[in-house]
Image: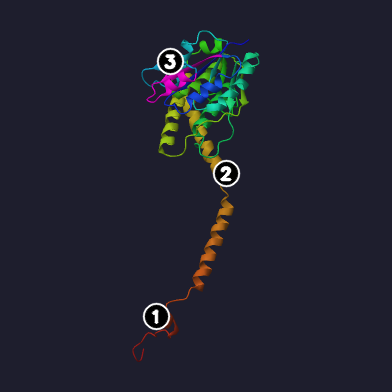
Amino acid sequence: MTHAVAIVPAFNRADTVGATVTALRTVSDVLDVIVVDDGSRDRTAAVAAAAGARVIELARNRGKGAAITAGIAASGAPDVYLLIDADLGASAALAGDLLQPVALGDADMTIAVFDAPDGRGGLGLVKGFAARVLRSQTGLDMAEPLSGQRAVRGPLLRSLQLAPGFGLEIGLTLDAANRDAVISEIAVGFTHRQTGRDLSGIAHRARIGRHVYLAVVARTGWPKAMYCLAASLLGRVISAARRVPVGHRGRRLGLAARARWRRARRLRLPRALRDLRSRRPWRRRTPHGS
């Protein structure tokens, strides 16, 4: 039997952490669920404890990387860790799909791939940057390089220095690949809350992007990070430009202009203008004998 521990970092997630903990406790081989309350200002800790989790409370918000580190320190020495976000709710019961390949020794780390977003998410700039870094540094071509839902062999995770904040995932993948770990992505039907494209969503993604960039700089150096960042931005611009049907757009604009001109010719002029147009044009008077 595999001894697995689920670590759930949570910040102001009283609305979903209870359902997430309840679902994780139904996963086979998960013997302990640890919720790290990362300085929440709501009832996250109380709700998690009521659902049956072991709760660690941080005095202030220290970020996702520090929360996972605190959970590892309190976990003992399990065979496998499940890293699960607090907003998965009841869908966290599917975490066994991530756990099984690691428990069987087929992979050192598995990463969940979510279903395609419904269009409310971001533009994919940070994810594209992370994917390019991983292709360049490790040869991995990943669909979800920043997915936080993972199963990791215990000895491997305990041997790594985790990146702070939201740089956790990209740092974890780079460090594990440098240890020649076997990393695989698995499609799992998790559902989670998506940040929109309003100001708060943009600010949240900007923080993620900053943390991801700093984690990459710490592991590859800033020249490599800057190259990957510029290349990913240029790739996005080129990809967007190729999707714009320039020829069709010009044709549509021409048709619209001609239609407006035809409508304008059919307009009935006001009476005063019609009267003026019906008169004979004035002739310029010239002096006699000219």
Of all residues, the one furthest to the front in this rendering is 50
Q: Position of residue 14 (x, y in %)?
A: 44, 26
- The total of numbered circles placed on residues is 3
Q: Is-magenta flag for residue 194? A: no
Instruction: Residue type at mark 1: give it.
Output: Ala
Q: Which residue is mark 3?
A: 56
Viewer-proximal residue among 149 and 18: 18
Instruction: Residue type at mark 3: give it.
Output: Ile
Q: Which residue is mark 2?
A: 242
Viewer-proximal residue among 30 and 153: 30
- Where the C terminus falls, by quadrant? bottom left
Q: Which residue is mark 1?
A: 272
Numbered disc 3: secondary structure: strand
Q: Position of residue 78 (x, y in %)?
A: 55, 10
Q: Is 285 situated above or below 97?
A: below
Viewer-proximal residue among 38 and 159: 38
- Tell me the magenta residue range: 31-51
